[in-house]
Amino acid sequence: MSQPISTVAFIGLGVMGYPMAGHLARAGLTVRVYNRTAAKGEAWAAEHGGSHHPTPREAAEGADLVLVCVGNDDDVRQVTTGEDGALSGMTEGSLLVDHTTASADLAEELDAACRERGIGFVDAPVSGGQQGAENGALTVMCGGSEANFARAEPVLAHYSRAVTLMGPAGSGQLTKMVNQICIAGLVQGLAEGLHFAEQAGLDQQRVVEVISQGAAGSWQMENRHQTMIRDEYEHGFAVDWMRKDLGICLEQARRLQARLPVTALVDQFYADVQVMGGSRWDTSSLLRRLRAFGKA
Ligand SMILES: NC(=O)c1ccc[n+]([C@@H]2O[C@H](COP(=O)([O-])OP(=O)(O)OC[C@H]3O[C@@H](n4cnc5c(N)ncnc54)[C@H](OP(=O)(O)O)[C@@H]3O)[C@@H](O)[C@H]2O)c1
């Protein structure tokens, strides 16, 4: 019988990790944090009363569960299996959960590294953005064994509205890829619709009010149309992160022999946005790319 989880470590206090770790502290868990830029770890501990540590290894010491939310595959390797990584501080019977959006290969690699040490592993990428993290309303897609999932789920529920086991290690990441594939074409469609409405001289706001009630409605339309109309993109989910995600999707698709023509095209549109200086703009900035062409 594994012990109930009372002490957790949270590694990576970015846009997502900072509020996620906050929900755990508010739920009464003992939270030990690590952040590469130490000032953020200090600020988090001052705000939430947990402890901050200089390395992932030290943060992980004594934790029943270690949660990670950093950037990409290599960043996860650095903070887990790398020098002074979390695994070197974790004990047999503890559990590692990775919230980073990363490859399914990495999930399988970490699952194997954890097994060797008698540690459980769950890949658990999230959807719902900064707003979802702050409001405790994320959707979490998990890969791992039923036993490991059952241990992690009550903790993840503190910042989520849905936590679902999709299959063995890697299945969470594969599901997140489906999520990003669906979003890529959708955001481009929304950008084209708003661009067309503008060129046609329609009141874009009124157009959205009408069509969002019908079959064209979407989360992106609901949550992004106002800032898109105002041409504001200094918020939300960064284009650089989306290109990282689409790169993972396209590489996986190549190996699966799945065809993703629209996803590949939209990835190139995001490369244009990066050239326009939009690496940190929200993904809805595809509209600014269309506007840049202007009228012929
Ligand atoms: N933002 C969203 O809307 C959203 C939504 C769903 C999923 N995600 C995914 O969630 C993950 C985190 O996103 P985010 O928006 O929170 O990113 P972020 O604000 O850029 O934060 C990234 C965090 O990871 C840390 N980090 C990065 N590389 C590291 C390394 N090599 N070693 C140690 N720490 C490292 C950063 O430390 P420093 O503070 O030192 O830079 C920071 O704490 C990404 O995989 C992203 O794709 C994001």
Image (cartoon, rainbow, N blue to C red):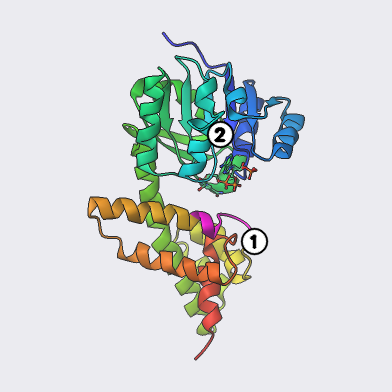
Residue furthest out toward the bottom: 296
Mark 2 crowd level (few <14, some 14–19, many ≥20, 10 Å Cα): many
Q: Decide if residue 52 is on the left or right side of residue 148.
A: right
Q: Which mark is residue 250?
A: none
Q: Nearer the viewer, residue 144 or 75?
A: 75
x 40%, y 31%: residue? 110
- Please, what secondary structure does the residue beneath circle 2 have? helix
Image marks 2 and 1: residues in contact by CB distance under 8 Å:
no
State the residue lying farthest toward the left.
257
Q: What residue is drawn where x is 60% and y is 68%?
A: 277
Asked if residue 157 shows in the view, the reply is no
Q: Is residue 90 visible?
A: yes
As shown in the figure, which amino acid type bears the numbered disc 2? Tyr
Q: Principal SS element in the magenta part?
A: loop
Q: Position of residue 207 (x, y in %)?
A: 51, 72
Which quarter is ligand 1 in?
top right
Please provide the residue range marked out in magenta: 234-241
Specify the amino acid type for callout 1.
Answer: Glu
Q: Find numbered disc 1 in the image and state the secondary structure of the residue it sits on.
A: loop
**What residue sits right under mark 1 in the picture?**
234
- The mark closer to the camera, 2 or 1, is 1
Residue found at x 38% / y 56%: 182
Crowd rating for badge 1 (residues with CA inside 10 Å; few <14, some 14–19, many 20+): few
Q: CA distance from mark 2 to mark 1?
A: 25 Å
Q: Earlier in the sequence, mark 2 or mark 1?
A: 2
x then y, percent, for residue 173: 38, 42
Figure quadrant of the N terminus = top left
Q: Which mark is residue 159?
A: 2
Whether residue 92 appears in magenta in the rendering, the answer is no
Residue furthest to the right in view is 46
